[in-house]
Structures are given as structure tokens and as C-alpha cells.
Amino acid sequence: MKRVLITAGANGIGRVMAQAFADEGYRVWVTDVDRAQIATLPRCIRGDAVDASDEPAMAGLFDRIAADWGGLDVLCANAGIKGPTAAIEDMDLTAWSACLAVNLNGAMIAAKHGARLMKPAGAGCMIFTSSTSGLYGTPYRAPYVAAKWGVIGLMKTVAMELGPFGIRANAICPGSVNGPRITSVIEAEAAAKGMTPDAVRQGYASGTALKRLSDPEDVAAMAVFLASPSARMISGQALAVDGMTYNVDP
């Protein structure tokens, strides 16, 4: 039975991803900082309250995985926060650093400790959650964008380093995905631009070829595919799941 770890897997996209892997017969382990949501996970999914940016805690988690499971087949480095929404001249350095700590440092920490479990096995798959914001700039979202660009660079380097050990690495780049996080982002952006949230949401949808936002299930399906044998020659790729975004400034 294949084994997958998903960071930030008790909420939002991560939770849907966890269920999708469970439905495919995987043994699923998730981390999250939301203890209340961890308590609501189905019995088939194991959960630990661990902050993805806390390296000692994450190192301990990977030790437990090694002890209990004997290894790891798939790592989904999914943890992320939206970070501050502000004009660059108003950007607070503490808020900037906090955003990068989770979105970028957290991905590196997961990859670092995932590699030590996967390399001895000579196989594995790492899936990083970036964003379409990692493919181009997004106004008022400088920390988030910088982190998500960094995740793609990290992924490509990991793919090069670990490929000789049979380990693939790819990044999923969701666009605007229905759920609480995009609602929070839209509300903050509406306030920054002096617009209504409905207008901003409609702008996000109309800026895609398919004229709609994605659902978490769309992202989860891509993760399951990338982990499958069907994707055995896909590595080092940043794959958008966004309905083809072409206007990034709604």
C-alpha cells in the first residue's frame, strides 16, 4: 500500500487531496496547525498537529513516519498562507517573513526530510503546491508571489538532484480555488482596491478562459495523477490548474 504525507492536510485543498489519496487506497498522514480540524479527520487518515515551518517538529514527524510506516512514497508539500495584501511601499517586513516561512521554508523543510526517507528506497514522488502566482506577478501580493516563485525554483532543483535516485518532483499551480482562503484574499484585495468583493471575484473568474474558479477537487485530481505510474516521466514541471488564467489583475 502506497504511503503519502500531506502538509496542511486538514483543511481546504489539502483535506480534499488527503481524501482523494485515501480513495485511491493510499495510507494517508497529514499535518496541520488546526487541531480542531485534525480531530474531524476520518479514521482512515492519520493527523498530527505540526507547523510546517518548524523544522525540529517536522524532523520528528518524519522520524515517526519512518518508524511506523518504514518509508514514504509520496510527499505533498502543500502548506501555505495567503500572507499580507498591501502595496509594496506599505509592506511590513515581519508579515513578509512570516509568509515566506510557511510557503517557502515549509516546502524546503518537507523536501529535505522527505529526501532522507525516499533516497534509500530509490523511488518517490514530491508534489509541491505553488500557485499561478508563481508563474507571474500579482498586484498587492508580493510576499505570496515571491514565495510561490521560490517554490517552483526549489522544485526544479529538487527534481534535478533527486532524479538520479528515482525520485520525481513537480509543482501544482492552482489558480483561484473556491473556498475560505480565496474568499479572504478577495475581501482583502477588494479593500485595498476600493472595490466590492463580488466585483473582485467576478474579475478573477472572467480572467480565465473557462470563466470560472477551480474547485479543490481539481487540484486533488492533479496530485493523484502526478503520484501515479501514468506520470512516471513527468518531473520538474510546474502545472497550472486554473482554467487558463490570462488576466492577472482583475
Image (tube, grey):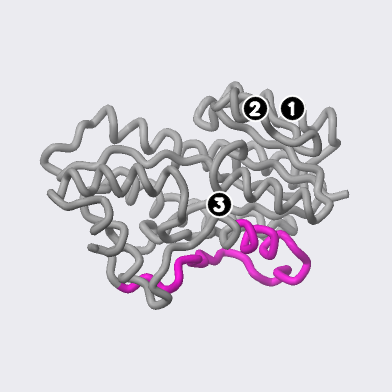
State the residue in front, 237 or 82.
82
Question: Disc 3 marks which residue?
Answer: 128
Disc 2 marks a residue whose amino acid type is Ala
Tell me residue 143's x, y (percent): 30, 43
**Residue 160 makes an appearance in the image:** no
Residue in view at x 32 percent, y 73 percent: 246
- Mark 3 to mark 2 CA distance (whole Å): 18 Å
State the residue in front, 99 or 248.
248
Disc 1 marks a residue whose amino acid type is Asp
Disc 3 marks a residue whose amino acid type is Phe
Q: Residue furthest bottom?
A: 209
Tell me, yes or no, whether the two marked residues, 2 and 1, touch with CB atoms within 8 Å.
yes
Residue in view at x 28 percent, y 59 percent: 137
First in sequence, mark 3 or 2: give its number. Answer: 2
Question: Disc 1 marks which residue?
Answer: 63
First in sequence, mark 1 or 3: give its number. Answer: 1
| Side (left or right) of 154 relative to 17 | left
Asked if 39 appears above or below 121 in the picture, the reply is above
Which one is in front in this view, the residue at disc 1 or the one at disc 3? Answer: 3
Residue in view at x 69 percent, y 65 percent: 225
Which one is in front in this view, the residue at disc 3 or the one at disc 2? Answer: 3
Question: Does the magenta portion include 242?
Answer: yes
- Mark 2 to mark 1 CA distance (whole Å): 6 Å
Packing grade of label 1 (10 A; few <14, some 14-19, many >=20) is: some
Packing grade of label 2 (10 A; few <14, some 14-19, many >=20) is: some
Question: Disc 2 marks which residue?
Answer: 59
Magenta segment = 220-246
